[in-house]
């Protein structure tokens, strides 16, 4: 970008912003905002807490979306004026400021452009994520823990709340699996590209001979079910097991049998929840997770039928790793699908994964090769 004239960069960013503004349709969004504000001002709004939360959540999302687009447009217009001023007065400092701002603006506009690519049926939903240990013994359990923390740190960087529904600790180290929700608009569209197998190569901290170990962990991403979704679950199709929650090393967290395990007999899907103190709350959370899994199963079946019809590119198979995290003999994180890579693996494990996520969104929306 340094070799390109600032004026040309500004033209490119302006064209990108115009396409984004056309996609977002600010006029329609402002109309929706006014209606939502009217609904939010109704005195008896909170008589129906679920409806109230839906209104206030949507209101916040629409305000944020409008503010983000308008804010970037204002920054871009201001930069055009500053560049003209720098040229007319031959101001080297002003030109240097334009070039610095262009770098940050280019990144911000690129992130917003990626959001416009999230137009799938469920992309605007919150995300339900399951991380589970695969092959590799205790290293795989530890790797699953590291991935869980990576996603939690990523969410924290963006200010996205995370609710952990279930955490299954492994006996020696790490976790067997974890189920959590990322409570933010477009979390599913953002994270769905993380679905698949993640591979870690390192010197095992659990091997007394310090040998290199390869381990695997699976990441499953599904959209959170909303009240309008038709996912009916017949009670006779469920087996409900109640047990006592436990923490690391078998330490009890609850003194009552409040944890819930649901088995959906027709599909064999098993869901557990033990984050709440109440058995009823755990069952409600477990039902929400089960509905999300069934909704995703239905989505995959529909997508498989369409892929069969059009012969398009298939999703990455869960049985093969698509991203590799190498700590030894060199340091590299590489995504096989998007070809994005970085040697700063510590930053990635600390939650700096936006470059992989954004590339995944673009990859998913790229025309299928024929």
Image (spheres, rainbow, N blue to C red):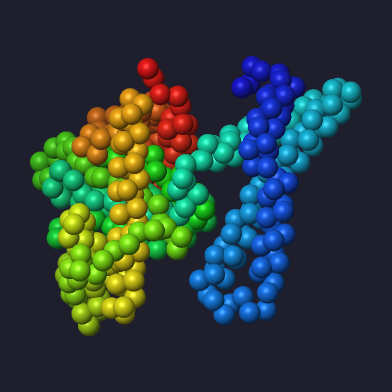
The residue shown at (40%, 28%) is 338
Q: Position of residue 298 (x, y in %)?
A: 32, 48
**Which one is nearer the viewer's eye here, 125 or 75?**
125
Residue in view at x 54 percent, y 76 percent: 48
Q: Residue furthest right?
A: 89
Residue 153 seen in the current view? no
Give the total number of marks visible in the rendering.
0
Q: Is residue 44 visible?
A: yes
In the rendered image, residue 12, in percent from the top left (x then y), is placed at: 68, 24
The picture places residue 146, in percent across and down from the top left corner, at 30, 50
The vertical placement of 219 against 281, above or below, is above
Horizontally, is 348 left or right of 233 in the view?
Answer: right
Q: Quadrant of the N terminus?
A: top right
Q: Is residue 108 positioned above or below 157 on the image?
A: above
| Closer-to-camera residue (32/196) | 32
- State the image coordinates of residue 202 (x, y, percent, origin top left): 23, 38
* Between 214 and 60, the one nearer to me in the picture: 60
Vertical arrangement, residue 242 with respect to residue 139, above or below? below
77 or 301: nearer the eye?
Answer: 301
Which quadrant of the view contains residue 51? bottom right
Which part of the image, by quadrant, shows the C terminus? top left
Give residue 262's quadrant in the image: bottom left
Residue at the left extreme of this rendering:
209
In the visual, does 209 lie left or right of 87? left
Instruction: Name which residue lies at 24% across and 30% down.
Output: 329
């Amino acid at each position: 970008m340094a070799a390109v004239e600032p004026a040309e960069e500004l033209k490119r960013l302006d064209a990108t912003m115009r396409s984004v503004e056309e996609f977002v349709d600010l006029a329609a969004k402002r109309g929706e905002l006014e209606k939502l504000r009217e609904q939010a001002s109704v005195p008896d709004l909170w008589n129906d807490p679920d409806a109230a939360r839906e209104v206030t959540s949507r209101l916040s999302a629409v305000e944020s979306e409008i503010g983000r687009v308008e804010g970037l447009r204002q920054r871009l217009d201001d930069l055009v004026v500053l560049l003209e001023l720098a040229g007319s007065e031959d101001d080297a400092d002003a030109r240097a400021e334009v070039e610095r701002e262009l770098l940050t603006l280019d990144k911000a506009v690129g992130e917003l452009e990626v959001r416009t690519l999230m137009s799938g049926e469920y992309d605007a939903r919150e995300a339900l994520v399951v991380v589970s240990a695969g092959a590799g013994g205790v290293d795989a359990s530890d790797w699953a823990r590291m991935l869980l923390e990576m996603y939690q740190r990523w969410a924290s960087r963006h200010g996205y709340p995370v609710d952990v529904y279930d955490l299954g600790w492994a006996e020696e180290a790490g976790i067997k699996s974890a189920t959590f929700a990322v409570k933010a608009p477009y979390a599913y569209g953002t994270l769905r590209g993380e679905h698949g197998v993640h591979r870690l190569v390192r010197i095992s901290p659990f091997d007394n001979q310090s040998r290199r170990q390869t381990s695997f962990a699976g990441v499953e991403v599904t959209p959170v079910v909303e009240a309008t979704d038709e996912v009916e679950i017949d009670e006779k199709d469920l087996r409900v097991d109640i047990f006592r929650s436990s923490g690391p090393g078998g330490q009890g967290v609850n003194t009552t049998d409040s944890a819930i395990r649901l088995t959906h007999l027709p599909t064999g899907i098993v869901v557990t929840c033990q984050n709440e103190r109440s058995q009823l709350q755990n069952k409600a959370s477990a039902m929400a997770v089960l509905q999300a899994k069934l909704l995703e199963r239905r989505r995959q079946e529909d997508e498989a039928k369409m892929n069969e019809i059009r012969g398009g590119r298939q999703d990455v198979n869960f049985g093969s790793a698509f991203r590799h995290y190498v700590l030894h003999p060199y340091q590299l994180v590489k995504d096989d699908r998007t070809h994005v890579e970085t040697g700063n693996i510590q930053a990635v494990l600390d939650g700096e994964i936006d470059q992989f996520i954004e590339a995944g969104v673009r990859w998913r929306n790229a025309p299928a090769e024929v």
